[in-house]
Image: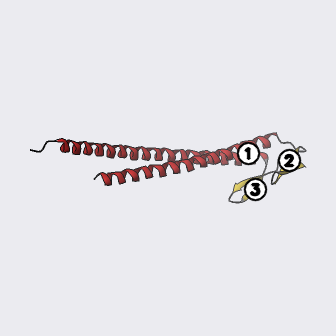
């Protein structure tokens, strides 16, 4: 029985480890979503402070930038997702960005709920493992006591 119990304990430990790995992936996803929210905040601040005629640095990629004059600060192109973008006035762009931020917040909350559910599952597995260990200890103690009894 103890051999089977050891195998069960090992399986439980592996299950807990798998849960911990999944939780770590989810935490990484939250960090990425938080970075996206920060980018939205920066874009929002830029739209709110940008004026027609301002000089800005436009990223070209690879760490290269070019200086450009803003022709019309009320014409903003906003990423809508799925490789689509749309031109909006400043208020429309801000509204679109706020909606995206709310969607990110919802996703972060969903992920946090998933992590909490995984915590509960891991706690249950660990409690089960403790029960198995306790049972094994009791069995070993009973076997020891039986061996210690004098033969009649």
Count up the numbered dots.
Answer: 3
Closer to the camera, 55 or 130?
Answer: 130
Q: Position of residue 62 (x, y in %)?
A: 80, 54
Question: Disc 3 designates what residue?
Answer: 86
Question: Disc 1 designates what residue?
Answer: 94
How is the rendered protein coloured? secondary structure
The answer to whether residue 32 is left or right of residue 89 is left
Circle 2 SS class: strand
Q: Position of residue 32 (x, y in %)?
A: 64, 48
Quadrant housing residue 148: top left
Q: Residues within 10 Å of mark 1 (few under 14, many from 20)?
A: many
Disc 3 or 2, which lies upstream in sequence?
Answer: 2
Q: Residues within 10 Å of mark 2 (few under 14, many from 20)?
A: few
Question: Disc 2 designates what residue?
Answer: 57
Closer to the camera, 59 or 68?
Answer: 59
The answer to whether residue 3 is left or right of residue 15 is left
Residue drawn at x 73%, y 54% is 79
Given this view, does label 3 or label 2 mark the residue nearer the observer? 2
Residue drawn at x 56%, y 44% is 109
Q: Position of residue 150 (x, y in %)?
A: 13, 42
Quadrant housing residue 142: top left
Contact, mark 1 vs mark 2 (Cβ under 8 Å): no
Contact, mark 3 vs mark 1 (Cβ under 8 Å): no
Circle 3 SS class: strand
């Amino acid at each position: 029985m103890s051999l089977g119990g050891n195998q069960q304990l090992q399986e439980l430990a592996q299950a807990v480890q798998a849960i911990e790995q999944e939780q770590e992936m989810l935490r990484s996803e939250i960090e990425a979503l938080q970075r996206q929210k920060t980018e939205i905040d920066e874009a929002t601040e830029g739209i709110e402070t940008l004026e027609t005629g301002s000089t800005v640095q436009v990223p070209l990629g690879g760490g290269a930038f070019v200086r450009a004059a803003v022709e019309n600060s009320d014409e903003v192109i906003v990423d809508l997702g799925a490789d689509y973008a749309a031109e909006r006035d400043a208020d429309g762009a801000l509204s679109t960005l706020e909606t995206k931020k709310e969607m990110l917040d919802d996703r972060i909350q969903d992920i946090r709920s998933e992590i909490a559910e995984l915590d509960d599952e891991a706690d249950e597995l660990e409690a089960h493992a403790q029960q198995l260990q306790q049972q094994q200890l009791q069995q070993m103690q009973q076997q020891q006591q039986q061996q210690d009894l004098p033969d009649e």
